Image: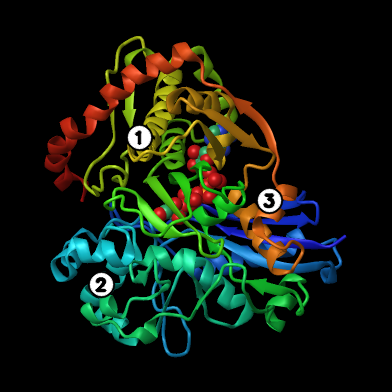
Amino acid sequence: MKYVIGIDLGTSAVKVLLVNQEGEVCKEVSKSYPLISEKSGYSEQNPEEWVEKTTAGLAELIEHLDADDIEGISFSGQMHGLVLLDQEDQVLRNAILWNDTRTTKQCQEIYEIVGKQQLLEITKNPALEGFTLPKILWVKEHEPEIFERSRTFMLPKDYLRFRITGNIHMEYSDAAGTLLLNVAKREWSHELLNSFGLSPELCPPLVESHEFVGTVKAEFAEETGLSEVTKVFAGGADNACGAIGSGVLSEGKTLCSIGTSGVVLSYEERNDLDFEGKVHYFNHGEEKAYYTMGVTLAAGYSLSWFKDTFAKQESFEPFLEGVNEVPPGSRGLLFTPYIVGERTPYADANIRGSFIGIDAVHERKHFARAVLEGITFSLNESLEIFRRNGKIIDSIISIGGGAKNEAWLQMQADIFNAKIERLTSEQGPGMGAAMLAAYGCGWFPSLKECAEVFIQTAKTYDPIKENVETYQKIFAIYQQVYQQTKMLNDQLSELRK
Ligand SMILES: Nc1ncnc2c1ncn2[C@@H]1O[C@H](COP(=O)(O)OP(=O)(O)O)[C@@H](O)[C@H]1O
Ligand SMILES: O=C(CO)[C@@H](O)[C@H](O)COP(=O)(O)O
């Protein structure tokens, strides 16, 4: 039997999947690593941790296999994180991650220098704290000696791939989240690079997600047990790979992914639609395709924060056991998941979360249900934007850690008022990476044909009319919380420092 490996370099862990030619996940290994947060709003990781944990994960994954049976490897990666390399390709500082919000000032500067309209025309996206360009500008301003020594910037999974192959590349789906790519023309924007005094040499050569970019270096092969002839393919941004791994490869398909962040994503054939920057508009991992997406910054993270703060020793299953006993609406308790700020629809790094309506009757299970509902309401705001723009969304594929819980899947059906599909593997991004390797190896003539073999629906959840009606009323209240708590949070922000 021949295999491919999908490496999903996530925010909380790297997950490596061994997939056979029928698309079955034969083995998976996960290795976690910490976030480094020196101050409120800061979020960094040491790139060496990614390399070490991936090395250990791969060694464990293939320990009883013949390495020659592994034909290809590809990647899915947390987006936007800035890795800076010097002239000798050494990492200059910790990576600044997608959920780091220190760059509000740099985002304002981007608008002052190029204007919002021009930025949208070139990159199709607004200036958001999480994107890579503001992080480069932050380093330029606050760490000029590091900026001066920077010769190349990379994104997390591109750096990991560089350590495996020795070759430097970036692919379109991740480059789209840097705010330096002309998304429709699929080239680095020299106009933007010039405007910010950045050398074009900082930007790696661009490749397609399924493109062959090298083989495994001798040193890495020795450490992991991989073969030096195994082919390596570029890979994609985690959300592009999540879409591939869920079969979101044609117009009309919609995905909800609840990982650390949460996204609602829709396939786009065209690159000339105008969402006025209200949702992200990126290159897909499939050639010449695109997707639009709304992002909840702390989706799964809100739940893991809540669990770790109040019941660290419990795992998710027992922790969430009581939520089904609580009626929709959590008996008047409402949560907003803005615990690290928000992106869609409120691009606001300063807003923070709230529990509204705490009553003496509420027990822990009410709080747990309210957290799940609040995360899902936030994702529903992105769906509303799509629906207001004329998209018909009556069926959604749900993946990520959030698709592991039955009660949450039913809640998604009721709040989104759409049929929810759970797949046999909820590992969308890792599966998408494996599919890019399978397609790159020539196992299938297209990603769509690969999806027909690799992806199966395990269960569907239909909206329950009564719950839909209840949630519509509560959602209208939820939508008022942002405006009504914005000023309070601005006043409290000083105390967070
Ligand atoms: N059994 C579970 N039930 C509900 N939610 C879960 C469960 N396990 C994990 N999660 C949620 O999924 C999130 C992690 O999802 P994952 O897709 O693994 O994240 P990432 O790729 O960002 O590292 C956690 O933060 C948690 O909120
Ligand atoms: O910033 C974004 C997308 O714009 C995030 O989706 C990151 O790509 C990280 O995702 P997860 O670790 O939550 O999967």
User: Quick one: SS at disc 3?
Assistant: helix
Name the N-terminal-most of marks 1 and 3: 1
- The numbered dot on residue 451 is 3
Q: How many marks?
A: 3
Name the N-terminal-most of marks 2 and 3: 2
Give the residue at x 67% y 73%.
232
User: For the residues marked 1 and 2, what is the alpha-carbon distance in whole angstroms?
Assistant: 33 Å
Image coords of residue 477 (percent x, y): 26, 22
355 shown above or below 292: above
Frontmost residue, 426 versus 185: 185
Image coords of residue 495 (percent x, y): 17, 44
Residue tagged 1:
384
- Residue type, label 1: Glu
In which quadrant of the rendered view does residue 460 lie? Answer: top right
97 shown above or below 356: below
Image coords of residue 138 (percent x, y): 25, 70
User: For the residues marked 2 and 3, what is the alpha-carbon distance in whole angstroms?
Assistant: 40 Å
Q: Residues within 10 Å of mark 1 (few under 14, many from 20)?
A: some
- Residue type, label 2: Leu
In which quadrant of the rendered view does residue 361 lie? Answer: top left
- Residue type, label 3: Ala
Residue tagged 2:
137
Q: Residues within 10 Å of mark 2 (few under 14, many from 20)?
A: many
Residue 313 seen: no
User: For the residues marked 1 and 3, what is the alpha-carbon distance in whole angstroms?
Assistant: 28 Å
Name the N-terminal-most of marks 1 and 2: 2
Give the residue at x 52% y 78%.
169
